[in-house]
Amino acid sequence: MLRPLLLLPGLLCDGRLWRDCLPPLAGIADPRIADLTRDDSVAEMAARALDLVEGEERFAVAGLSMGGYVALEVWRQARGRITHLALLDTSARPDTEEQKRRRRALMALSKSGQFKGVTPRLLPSLIHPSRLDTPLAGEVMEMAARVGHDGFLRQQLAIMGRPDSRPDLPEIDIPTLVACGDEDLLTPPALHDEMAALIPGARRIGFARAAHLPTMEVPQEAGAALRDWLLR
């Protein structure tokens, strides 16, 4: 029987984030990709995502970046139903004041009619430098365009309002994958080391030559890691 797998995209991301890492999961998972563009709080995002697994007694959850924040909230809302948890390129910490300041600046830029300028500014932080002049960069920008101005603003509000999840981590008692690109600048490896140390039995993986979007940058490696995680 296929295991329902709730997939939670990051900021300015949609289902394209997961597309190329899904083939290794064939035969073991039933992927269900949440739309995280419609709500302005992590709690509301999680509640809407849970609609995708309504009626399922048990399911797995994987989130990347903002999706990781939502994954932790899904765990808080439905912890008794979750069999596996994957936290990719994310953090359990709340935003610092400096991070909030940068987000507000990007929101102001977007509100001024320069939404298309947001992604080029973010792109060097999202993918490895070796991929900035490749078709992948264009796909990341197209994905952001599909999320759009309004979705971006709602997502930023949700991110700024998220709670500190660190106190919850020691209570996670299911197979947990904590993974990130080795060259992730937005959520550096040290933040993942912190999470893995706090979650009992967590498996910590790093992806070489990848930054913040390893499911797109190194999809075969990311897919293999997800497969091994689901088979635990």
Image (cartoon, rainbow, N blue to C red):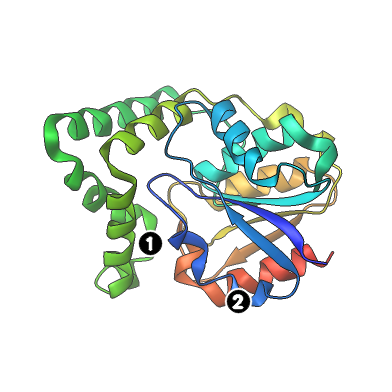
- Residue 219 visible in the picture: yes
Mark closest to the chain's N terminus, 2 or 1? 2
Horizontal side of residue 106 vs 16, given as left or right: left
Q: Of 93 and 6, which appears nearest the observer?
A: 6
Q: Is residue 12 above or below residue 45?
A: below
Residue displayed at 55% across by 44% down: 67
Q: Determine the residue located farthest toward the left in the rendered image.
A: 113
Residue displayed at 51% across by 46% down: 65
Mark-to-mark CA distance, 2 and 1? 22 Å
Q: Of 147 and 117, which appears nearest the observer?
A: 147
Q: Tell me the quadrant of the picture where the C terminus can be found.
A: bottom right
**SS class, disc 1:** loop
Q: Position of residue 188 (x, y in %)?
A: 51, 49
Q: Position of residue 172 (x, y in %)?
A: 81, 40
Locate residue 204: give its quadrant: bottom right
Circle 1 residue:
127
Residue displayed at 21% across by 35% down: 110
Q: Nearer the viewer, mark 2 or mark 1?
A: 2
Q: Position of residue 210 (x, y in %)?
A: 47, 66
Q: Residues within 10 Å of mark 2 (few under 14, many from 20)?
A: some
Residue displayed at 34% across by 46% down: 147
Circle 2 residue:
23
Q: Is residue 31 above or below residue 52?
A: below
Mark seen at residue 187: none
**SS class, disc 2:** helix
Horizontal side of residue 50 vs 107, given as left or right: right
